[in-house]
Image (cartoon, helix red, strand yellow):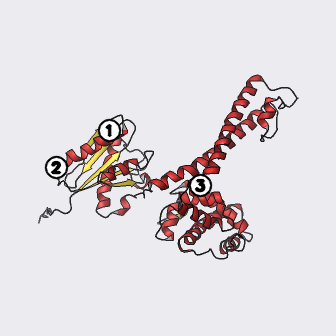
Amino acid sequence: MLPTQEKDFTRGEEILAVSLELSKGSWKVALHEGRRDKPAIHAVSSEAAGARLGQVVGVIEATRKKWGLAAGCRVVVSYEAGQDGFWIHRALTKLGYEVLIVDPASIPVERRARRAKTDRLDVIKLVTSLRAWLRGERDRMHVIRVPEIAAEAQRHLVRDRGELQKEGQQHRDRIRKLLRTVGCWVEVERDFAERLAHGEVRGYDGAALPPELHQRLTRECQRLALAQQQFAELEAALVRQLPQPVRERITRLTRLKGVGEVGAMRLVLELFWRNFSNRRQLGACVGLVPQPYDSGESRVDQGISKQGNRRVRALLIEMAWLWLRHQPHSALSRWFAQRTQGTGANKRHRRISIVAVARRLVIALWRYLKDGVIPEGAQIKAA
């Protein structure tokens, strides 16, 4: 008895799935409405960003008319998160399209040692995953939440502050290393540029620095002075540029001992601009949740996931160490002390435990901002 092949021709909601593979030279556009064997692939390569986006819209509308889809059918566009940011999402949303930004690491790929990889294959994989996601298979890809324009703009301030601080330290390290090549071990202090200009900086034997080295050090001092000037100007005007609700949240965090103004500002602007439903969602967002590997007889702890914002993750580790120092009587500090005391505790065990403290700390701070619940045993700074 031969099996009977059945086909269901009942039409549901018409959805045109569109995926974009972005690159500098051109974009690949894949379109699929669910009734064809293969998606349609197009390429747009206009030099201007607005014109290239207009070409994408033209391809979508032309394909919709060609396939006989209704003018008001649902159009869902997806592309991978990357250096293009969110401007494509905002531009297409204004035109009435539904846009999803996908985490590239969440799309499953073949595990062969050698596999073909081209922009065409990538955009086909992306539109296929999008069709599955629209059918309810949410594990096929992870959608990224898009911040508001104001929240994204405010992050530039705190990130620029960090870059300027890092740049100044890089200039100091470079000057220090250049001086060591001639046996000069002086510290690079505030008056170093003036001492260098007056010839007070000399080698190990008291001889003057070579003219070429002196010129290079002078240029490094000029770049260092510029970075310090920009850092001071930004530091003075940073908080005033933030809206009042954001400043109030920063002030609330700084009331807790062990939380400074810079750490609170970075945490609010980088993480707490979005709303979380529960603590598991928060822990997964910062990438501080464990990733077990349990298959057959293999049971391995792979460490934390390290997903999400790496700046926030590094900040939370620093804040966890400060919390232990300034909040020794809190429940978190007592829990850390119990886990790390004894003969079996070593430096590696402390580094592992501090990650758990950081995860618990961010959850406690989230509850403190959301519901006003002070972390257990935490002390408030004096007014």
- In this rendering, the label closer to the viewer, 3 or 1: 3
Query: Does label 3 or label 1 sit earlier along the sequence?
Result: 1
Left or right: where 191 falls relative to 44? right
Left or right: where 287 falls relative to 3? right
Report, in whole angstroms, how far the alpha carbon at label 2 lies from the one at label 3: 54 Å
Q: Quadrant of the C terminus?
A: bottom right
Q: Can you tell which quarter of the image residue 14 is in? A: bottom left
Query: Does label 2 or label 3 sit earlier along the sequence?
Result: 2
Left or right: where 43 falls relative to 24? left
Q: Is residue 207 visible?
A: yes
Q: Which mark is residue 67?
A: 2
Q: Confirm or deny contact between disc 3 and disc 1 (CB under 8 A).
A: no
Disc 3 crowd, CA 10 A, few/some/many (<14, 14-19, 20+): few
Give the image location of residue 201, x and y in percent.
Answer: 82, 32
The residue most toward the top is: 211
Q: Secondary structure at mark 3?
A: helix
Q: Which residue is mark 1?
A: 51
Q: Which mark is residue 133?
A: none
Give the image location of residue 55, x and y in percent.
Answer: 28, 40
Report, in whole angstroms, how far the alpha carbon at label 3 lies from the one at label 1: 38 Å
Q: Is residue 84 above or below residue 364?
A: above
Q: Can you tell which quarter of the image residue 332 is in? A: bottom right
Disc 2 crowd, CA 10 A, few/some/many (<14, 14-19, 20+): few
- In this rendering, the label closer to the viewer, 1 or 2: 1
Q: Amino acid at mark 3?
A: Arg
Q: Amino acid at mark 1?
A: Ala
Q: Which residue is mark 3?
A: 240
Left or right: where 52 falls relative to 349? left
Give the image location of residue 61, x and y in percent.
Answer: 22, 47
Q: Amino acid at mark 2?
A: Trp
